[in-house]
Image (cartoon, helix red, strand yellow):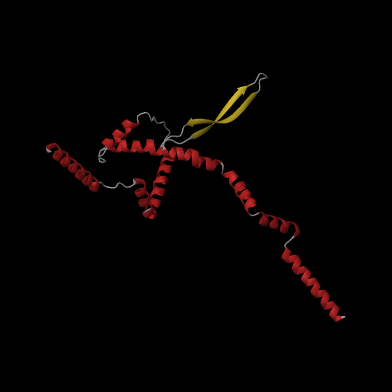
């Protein structure tokens, strides 16, 4: 009887603990949803700030001297950054700026012109000009500039052809009408001339 009472008390105690634990549970929300709602609510203020930061990184990328970075010691760089909390110290500021230059600015893709001269068997010299990779891109802005901005700048000559092809595929009637007007003449002018001819003929018949 005593063991039965002990078991009953233990079961009741366990049920009470489960109920209290369930009531004390905190519902966890998705952090991505909260971040998205925050950006949506403050979009008007965050957009110019992001554009300004992007322009600053692009200017720094274009004006900084050449150099290469090694990304094998990421953990060490992060630890040095976390230890550089005193911005009034010169070494701390240098560590912070170096981290920004390395991971956020990076290095710019550079292709320099090179000339190769080869002497042939007949004594003539053949000169060949080509592009030589002198600096590989790295860092966030360096990669965006190499695979985004520089590619758009190199292919901007095709922009007019792409726009023309898009217009031709989407509005072919307008294109053919303009070509017809250039070859034959504006339909309004021909209609006006025919109308004036008919009116002149009618006036002559009336006089007779």
Q: Residue at x 35, y 32 (%)?
A: 74
Give the camera-side residue of 15 and 192: 15
The one nearer the camera, 70 or 10, is 10
The picture quadrant where one finds residue 202 is bottom right
Image location of residue 138, percent across then percent down? 43, 34
Name the residue furthest right: 208
* Numbered disc total: 0
On the rendered structure, is 67 left or right of 25?
Answer: right
**Identity of the residue drawn at 36% across and 55% down:** 41
Task: Please state if 73 lies on the left or on the right of 116 as rendered.
Answer: left
Quarter containing the N terminus: top left
The residue located at (80%, 71%) in the rendering is 197
Q: Is residue 111 left or right of residue 84?
A: right
Vertical order, 19 against 2 (above or below): below
Question: Residue 67 location, x and y as percent?
Answer: 42, 32
From this view, report whether residue 23 is shown above or below residue 95: below
Q: Out of 57 and 124, give the one closest to the viewer.
A: 57
Single out the residue that lies furthest toward the bottom.
Answer: 207
Q: Which residue reaches farthest top?
A: 121
Location of residue 72 with respect to 63 vertically, above or below:
above
Residue located at (21% from left, 44% from top):
15
| Image quadrant containing the C terminus | bottom right
Quarter of the image holding residue 113? top right
Looking at the image, residue 80 sits to the left or right of residue 13; the answer is: right
Q: Position of residue 191 (x, y in %)?
A: 75, 67
Q: Residue furthest front?
A: 1
């Amino acid at each position: 009887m005593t063991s039965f009472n002990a078991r009953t008390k233990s079961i009741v105690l366990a049920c009470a603990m489960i109920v209290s634990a369930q009531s004390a549970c905190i519902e966890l929300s998705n952090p991505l949803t909260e971040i998205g709602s925050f950006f949506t609510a403050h979009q008007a203020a965050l957009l110019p700030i992001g554009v300004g930061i992007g322009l600053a990184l692009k200017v720094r990328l274009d004006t900084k001297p050449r150099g290469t970075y090694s990304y094998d010691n990421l953990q060490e760089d992060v630890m040095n950054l976390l230890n550089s909390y005193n911005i009034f110290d010169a070494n701390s500021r240098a560590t912070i700026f170096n981290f920004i230059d390395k991971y956020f600015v990076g290095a710019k893709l550079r292709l320099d012109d090179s000339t190769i001269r080869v002497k042939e068997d007949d004594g003539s010299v053949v000169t060949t000009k080509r592009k030589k990779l002198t600096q590989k891109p790295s860092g966030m802005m360096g990669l965006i500039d190499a695979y985004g901005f520089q590619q758009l700048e190199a292919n901007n000559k095709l922009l007019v052809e792409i726009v023309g092809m898009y217009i031709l595929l989407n509005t072919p009637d307008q294109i053919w009408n303009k070509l017809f007007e250039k070859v034959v003449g504006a339909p309004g002018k021909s209609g006006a001339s025919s109308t004036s001819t008919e009116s002149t003929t009618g006036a002559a018949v009336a006089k007779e």
